[in-house]
């Protein structure tokens, strides 16, 4: 099946960014500059089909609020720009992954020969176990 391309990042009308003080590496810079970014995306306005929305909810997990906002916090890097790009990239990956259709399971049933082989092996095993019973000295 052909892979459909989706916009890498939702448009700015449904995205809200907030910069926070980050933790981790960066020395005094961490205390002075708000480098971490919290990205909030209104997931209802993404316009996903029902099957993709269901999968999106499962993939997002606790990052999806009850109000339907996807919250992604990025603080891996020391600059705002890098964290911003990281958050947008993670959001885009999540949306793209939600749009991948799962392969349908094709039901199969064992053939008559396979059923017969299974029953024969059960009978053979039963005979082996029966042979382990009490020995009569008749």
Image (spheres, rainbow, N blue to C red):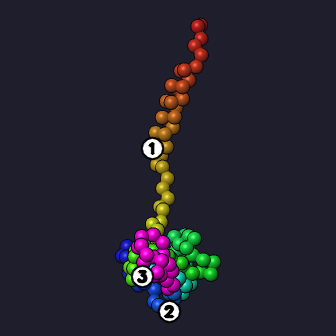
| Residue 21 counted in the magenta span | yes
User: What residue sits right under mark 3 in the picture?
Assistant: 80
Read off the magenta span: 17-34
Q: Earlier along the polypeptide chain: callout 2 or callout 1?
A: 2
Say above or below: 33 vs 129. Answer: below
For the question of whether residue 107 can be seen, the reply is: yes
User: What residue sits right under mark 2 in the picture?
Assistant: 13
Q: Position of residue 100 (x, y in %)?
A: 44, 73
User: What residue sits right under mark 1 in the picture?
Assistant: 113
Q: Is residue 15 left or right of residue 7?
A: right
Mark 2 or 1: in front is: 2
Q: Position of residue 39 (x, y in %)?
A: 50, 81
Report the Cα–Cα distance between label 3 and label 1: 65 Å
Report the Cα–Cα distance between label 3 and label 2: 20 Å
Q: Position of residue 26 (x, y in %)?
A: 41, 73
Circles 2, 1 touching at the beta carbon (< 8 Å):
no
Name the element at disc 1.
Answer: helix
């Amino acid at each position: 099946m052909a892979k459909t391309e989706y916009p890498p990042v939702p448009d700015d009308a449904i995205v809200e960014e907030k910069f926070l003080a980050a933790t981790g590496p960066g020395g005094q810079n961490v205390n002075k500059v708000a480098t971490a970014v919290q990205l909030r995306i209104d997931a209802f306005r993404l316009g996903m089909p029902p099957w993709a929305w269901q999968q999106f909810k499962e993939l997002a997990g606790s990052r999806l609020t009850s109000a339907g906002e996807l919250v992604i916090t990025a603080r891996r890097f020391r600059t705002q720009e890098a964290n911003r790009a990281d958050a947008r990239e993670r959001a885009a990956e999540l949306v793209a992954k939600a749009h991948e259709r799962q392969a349908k399971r094709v039901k199969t049933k064992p053939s008559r020969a396979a059923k017969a082989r299974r029953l024969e092996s059960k009978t053979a095993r039963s005979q082996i176990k029966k042979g382990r019973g009490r020995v009569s000295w008749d």
